[in-house]
Image (cartoon, grey):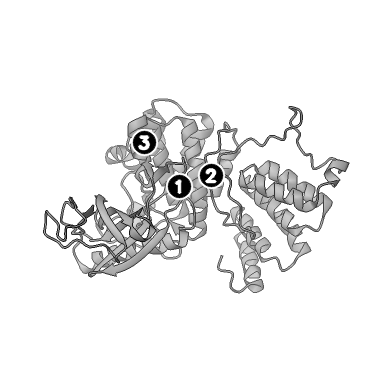
Amino acid sequence: MICCLNPDCHNPPNSDRTMFCSNCGTGLVVLRNRYRPIKTLGGGGFGKTYLAEDIDKLNEYCVIKQFAPQVQGTAALNKATELFEQEAKQLQQLGNHRQIPTLLAYFNQDNRLYLVQEFIDGQNLLDELKQQGIFNQQKVRELLLDLLDILKTVHHQQVIHRDIKPENIIRRSDGQLVLIDFGASKQLTATVMTQIGTTIGSFGYASLEQMQGGKAYPASDLYSIGATCFHLLSGIHPWELWQRQGYGWVASWRQYLQQPVSEDLGRILDRLLQEEYQQRYQSAAEVLQALNSEPIPVTQSVTPPVTPTPRQKNSIPIYLVVIPLIVLMGGGTVYLLRPTNPVTIEQKSKSADTYYNEGLEKYNNKDFRGAIEDYNQAIQINPKYADAYINRGLARYNLGDNQTAIEDYNQAIQINPNYADAYINRGLARYNLGDNQTAIEDYNQAIRINPNYAD
């Protein structure tokens, strides 16, 4: 089957042998002789989205986004074009992440722009809410852990999404969450003021600074996450409250819940939903630290561990893995390695590299404390193991312990003064502690060591 790409048509399916649309008479085309549109998925102010088949990949599904803006005036058209092109650039920049759609193509055909991206087989969270009912607080905690991990990567790449809401979060068939629709995203370094009468973001989910001045910060995305969590917990669209109260509803959001949440989760949502962005968490890592400081029930892993890249930097790939149980079988007894114990004969039989690799495996499974214990052993065997210090620092950083992470990076730098990654990671930890000046010094040092270090 094939459907036409006339944005003004209701795009009925047509036989592959048909040359013209049965509804509007428009010629039917396969874009670039490769991407065959088969049905429309929806539309908006910028154009339409189609489900398509990639002929070159055995008819694998993909998504075509067509640029057909319903705007008037040169300024509005230029803004719409800028956002469409920006989405392609953001997907290219971020699409190596498993939980962000991959850009497949971006091109102009027949004087119209098209973007082709990976098809995500799953259901968005708004549909999940409608079918399964309101989320319980454990499900919301898991959502936060997943989504914030994705945002750590997005914000590290100097990108703000600006339109986080349940419709833009898809639960893939394997259980992983995927963040979609980067059409409203922007670079941190390029604050864009919206034109009078226009907004970028969705009413109810967009923060005050977005709605009033078109400005956006990492904390703006965090507000949208808070509003998303409220919607999923309550079943009430925040726009319904916003229409009557403006941002006044955020001070009394608990009264709309059908079931109360714990004091700990409530405090986190309180801070995510602060009206003034300065009062919110300032980074995804900061929220994760708050979440991880409270006991969270262990659930089964929904995806296999992914091997980290050889060079671990502060932009650690974020994967949806909920903490699995690591059980060392020994006649039914669970043994924990204690870094403060003397090295036993059994431990000496293992090399530092063996402990290091075991630490990597635990790190991939997000067993950060177990990884730290293995790195402790590797360092005890080889006190000059710079990579072990770096990875132990990364594990500590993920647990929110920035200060001891810095101490590990210091050790790595002392062993190898030209270790650029150590400076980068130490800079991020210092930045999280509010020490911007020394963070800049670390980044400068990394650049001096490697002038091509884009991060």
Q: Quadrant of the C terminus?
A: bottom right
Marks 2,3: beta carbons within 8 A: no
Q: Residue at x 29, y 65 (%)?
A: 33
**Residue position for label 2:** 287
Crowding near the residue tagged with mark 2, few <14, some 14–19, many ≥20 C-alpha atoms within 10 Å: many
User: In the structure shown, which secondary structural element does the residue marked by tag 2 occupy?
Assistant: helix
Q: Could you give the CA–CA distance between mark 3 and mark 1, rounded to whole angstroms?
A: 21 Å
The one nearer the camera, 340 or 229, is: 340
Q: Is residue 172 visible?
A: yes
The label number, if any, that marks residue 128 in the structure image: 3
Residue sitting at 55 percent across and 33 percent down? 299
Q: Dot 3: within a 10 Å radius of its alpha carbon, few (fewer than 14), some, or many (20 or more) residues?
A: some
Q: Position of residue 302 (x, y in %)?
A: 52, 39
Which amino acid type is shown beneath numbered disc 2? Val
Please state the horizontal and vertical placement of residue 138, each as a whole percent of the image. 50, 32
Q: Residue at x 84, y 40 (%)?
A: 341
Q: Amino acid at mark 1?
A: Leu
Label placed on residue 205: none
Foreground tag (2 vs 3): 3
Residue 437 position, x and y percent, is 62, 63
- On the image, the x and y values in percent for residue 12 come to 17, 50
In the structure shown, which secondary structural element does the residue marked by tag 3 occupy? helix
Q: Are marks 1 and 2 in contact (CB under 8 Å)?
A: yes
Disc 2 from disc 3: Cα separation:
25 Å
| Three-letter amino acid code of the residue under disc 3 | Glu
Most distant residue in the top direction: 259
Of mark 2 and mark 3, the one earlier in the sequence is 3
Disc number for residue 222: 1
Does dot 1 land on a helix, a strand or a loop? helix
Q: Residues within 10 Å of mark 1 (few under 14, many from 20)?
A: many
Q: Earlier in the sequence, mark 1 or mark 2?
A: 1
